[in-house]
Image: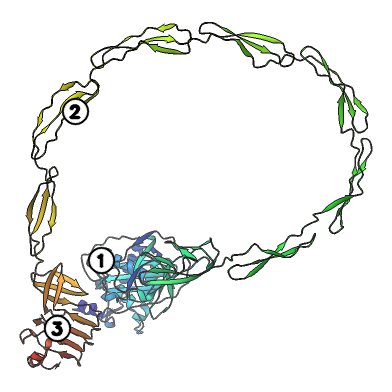
Amino acid sequence: MKKERRDKMKKVIMAFFFCLLFSVSVQAKDVLPTNKTTASEGCTFVGVEGEYITDAQNALKRINEIRYEACEEGVWKMDIYGKPTTEKLTLSDYKPIKWSSALEYIARIRAAEATVVLAHERPNNENFFTSTLTSNGQKSYSENLAWNGGKSMLSGIEQWYKEKSDWVNKTGKTTGHYTSMINPDYNYVAVATFYNPDAAYKNATSAEFSYKKGLDETMNEMAGECIQTLEVKDSYLSLKLPVNNTSIKAGENTQAQANAVITNPSAIMHGETCEASLIGDITWTSSNKQVATVDKDGKITGIDYGTATITAKSGTLSQTITVNVTTHAWDTGKVTTPPKCEEKGVKTYTCTKCGATKTEAVEATGHQHTEIRNAKEAKCETAGYTGDTYCTDCNKKLKEGKEIEATGHQKTEVRGAKEATCEKAGYTGDTYCLKCEKKISTGTEIAKKPHTWNAGKVTTAPQCEKEGVKTYICTKCGATKTEAVEATGHQHTEIRNAKEAECETTGYTGDTYCTDCNKKLKEGVVIELTGHQNIEVRDAVEATCKKAGYTGDIYCLKCGKQISTGIEIPAKAHSWGTGKITKPASYTKTGIKTYTCKICGTKRTEAINKIPMPRVGTVYTIAGNQYRITKAGAEVSLIKTNAKAKSINIPATIKANGITYKVTTIAAKAFKQNKKLQSVTVGANVKSISNNAFFKCPSLKTVNLKTVLLTSKTASKKAFKGANKKLVIKVPKKVKKSYKKIFKGLKVK
């Protein structure tokens, strides 16, 4: 009984210890699931990046040291409410607490959840002590939570241990964390630490306790960086939509990144936020694709001048940003201030869409038009002057001239030159300056040249077996030389006297002759008869399911001769295949399966048995309410309703899997403790309403009974035990008198 009372208390124990906050860069590794595979209504799965810190062996050792110390020093025992008694622990009370694999799974999830909600409350708004968080059928019966900024599992245990002095001295302050560790009734514990670098308190340590026996003691000790999936209530979530640049040009890109933001709902640290990654798909849209587009990964591309709203949506979450595409459509511009030689000008551009203007400098022209003054030409043996450079636009002297060295005899010509030939020497000639007519050098003799032969020409053509002659001429002096041209050989041949071989007669390859000299070069040979090589089958008939066939006669395609006679082929059997369901079976009627012969198309059918009716006890969920079959194919009982609904209509019938059932009974506790329920309509086929059907429905004010089938044996006011005192039961007029007796003490209209 002591343990049962303790279960009902499940006190909320919290400790907050403020430590230095560290910033840690986390690279997400594996995505770890939470205890649910489908998010509850009004909730969304998000991923919190962090790191599991583990030191399980030392954590278990430290808790057992604290338990032993409490028994050795004789600290106060506790009552079922966690208050100190007048008795003290002794060494006979000490027993080492053990590690639980199931509790470790719960502790890991709770440690991650505690970084975003600083309370014994889950991010999905479940109270931890009444939640569905279990492992292998086990749950936690007490929970310690600690928050700090370090990367240690033991630091949380030491935070709980600091409550020892208040427990020993009975100060009345929070001591539940310490007493959970020393409580001899607890046989199992598990501790987990999750480090979330984006949380207000980065380290959250959870310890889960159980008084059960015989649990699995395996230490899984999961550690390392990860993304832990959390189920978070939608009202705690918002969407953050950072973007690299909200003002871009046409053709440019900018990247948006959608992240979830969890707002801490707990009283302490209320409003603090923590970023999380989105687990589900993100949908991106643009309000004006003519201005900007966005792809499935959030990349935004500028299209044309204007403004577009970019929306990111994931589940019920959405966020928008405004992107401005700022590129103006500038004209070609106009020079409004002309540039000068050494002064810049101004060019003005006007946007053809909005009329905005911009200017840019026009580079100074520079001294584009110049002339040389005071120049003096240099001569062969006397110096000259380059002249000074002046700008003809502004008359500025730009550059001083330089003295020009005497040119020397630059322009010369050769006189008295004579070209050497194949038969006579030549002369290089004497060199004279053309400018001053001075003889600069005397020439030398040039030796005679070798013959330069042309490509040659065949003057006597070669024959098949006789050489020809090729004659070459010197292109300089006309001298000639000859060389032999090889005989051509028999280059052009033909086959004569050839005869093709036939199916039953020989042929002849033919003799080879040279067509140039008519010489017989090679004798032919006899070609063996070909035989009947190309044949075809004629008059063949394929066998069917009803008639015999014929293989056909074989003929030679070349000579037309019949080579062989065919034989008869026996008729075939039907080939039915696997068949096709042409009329599906139902709960009330048999079906039909039709088979078609693949060869001749003949059909046959066979019956398909009816589908068995769902058995009594089968449960269906329809419109959030649960119904159990009480009579196969005919009747159901309402056994559970939507706990969040304010108004519920119990229909006369429901339809499940194609079968219509009458709703004839409302089971006990069908509406139990539905605190939001205000009105109920009961269908016309209900014959029985069990006691406590509407147990503790404090907001229920109206019940509209459309049924006239209730009797004092099948319904009573006990069905509405704990309902609102102002409850009104509306009934059909013809049964109002009898129903007032049935629901005596309740208001019946």
The answer to whether mark 2 and mark 3 are in CB contact below 8 A is no
**Rendering coords of residue 76 (x, y %):** 29, 79
- Which one is in front, 95 or 616? 616
Q: Which residue is mark 2?
A: 537
Q: Nearer the viewer, mark 3 or mark 1?
A: 3
Distance CA(mark 1)–CA(mark 2): 78 Å
Say which quadrant the C terminus sits in. Answer: bottom left
- Identify the amino acid type marked 3: Asn
Comes first in the chain, label 1 or label 2: 1
- Which residue matches tag 1? 135
Question: Which amino acid, by three-letter code, is at mark 2?
Answer: Val
Classify residue 670 by image quadrant: bottom left
Q: Is residue 103 left or right of residue 267?
A: left
Compared with residue 560, is residue 473 higher up or lower down, i.e. above or below?
A: above
Return the x and y of residue 397 as percentages of the image width and height: 88, 55
Q: Is residue 512 above or below residue 23?
A: above
Tag on residue 692?
A: 3
Amino acid on which the number 1 mark rests in the picture: Ser
Image quarter hosting the N terminus: bottom left
Q: CA distance from mark 2 to mark 3?
A: 90 Å
Does residue 705 appear in the picture of this structure? yes
**Please, is residue 520 above or below residue 533 in the view?**
above
